Amino acid sequence: KAGVTQTPRYLIKTRGQQVTLSCSPISGHRSVSWYQQTPGQGLQFLFEYFSETQRNKGNFPGRFSGRQFSNSRSEMNVSTLELGDSALYLCASSLLTSGRAEDTQYFGPGTRLTVL
Amino acid sequence: KQEVTQIPAALSVPEGENLVLNCSFTDSAIYNLQWFRQDPGKGLTSLLLIQSSQREQTSGRLNASLDKSSGRSTLYIAASQPGDSATYLCAVVASNYQLIWGAGTKLIIKP
């Protein structure tokens, strides 16, 4: 089975621009979560989607948004980029057959975003 | 607010040693605790998941324990190998169903 894939792997943008990152979950997985990883703040939860609905959201400004498609693929968008948005953005998928708390998350390699 | 702390931040040991990584959390109301490893450029790999009702989980040379009442978990690595070198992260699923992460322990195994 193919793992979680994320595109692009690297991205360079300038302040004020917007960016869209893509995540394809493992086949059959219905839940997709997004995380931001920075040296200063570590890993932080952004949001989780399940069956095209946002089920949970972390403490990030509204510039960060996402969506999930009927095939479970997910995108996240960051508008009006700031220097502090430079980070590794990780996507994870899980099966979620029996309940949110019981399922292991499988991570993609991440997208490294640099904002200049 | 749930906070997760990992000690030490970095650890360097010779190959073959047994070692323990520590994780502590402030709120015992968790659904599960997970240990991950992160290799440069390769994302995160789940190692062990301990449900809140469990005390420990084992996978090969790895053993993770959970003591909810004291807010602690340990990851025991037996007979360490250079391939175990990575950053090890602990995370808990908090009462709001969000994964709350520790800052990680960077482990170096010297041949």
Image (cartoon, coloured by chain):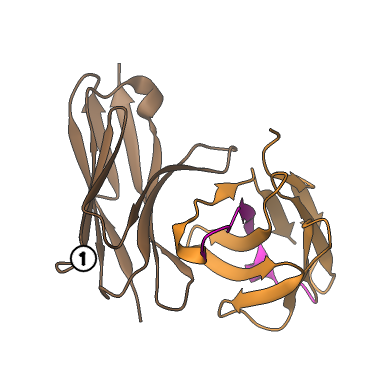
Chain colours: A orange, B brown
Q: Is residue A107 above or below residue A89?
A: above
Q: Secondary structure at mark 1?
A: loop
Residue depicted at 15% across the width and 69% down the height: B69
Q: Quadrant of the C terminus of chain A?
A: bottom right
Q: Is residue B70 left or right of residue A113?
A: left
Among the 4 quarters of the image, the one containing residue A65? bottom right
Q: Quadrant of the N terminus of chain A?
A: top right
Check residue A12 for magenta coloring. Answer: no
Q: Is residue A29 left or right of residue A37?
A: right
Percent across and percent down for residue B103 are 38, 57
Q: Is residue B50 left or right of residue A26?
A: left
Other-residue count near label 1 (Cα within 10 Å), few / some / many at <14 / 14–19 / ≥20:
many
Residue depicted at 31% across the width and 27% down the height: B60
Circle 1 is placed at which residue position?
A: B68
Residue depicted at 71% across the width and 56% down the height: A114
Residue depicted at 40% across the width and 77% down the height: B95
Magenta stretch: give its range. A80-99
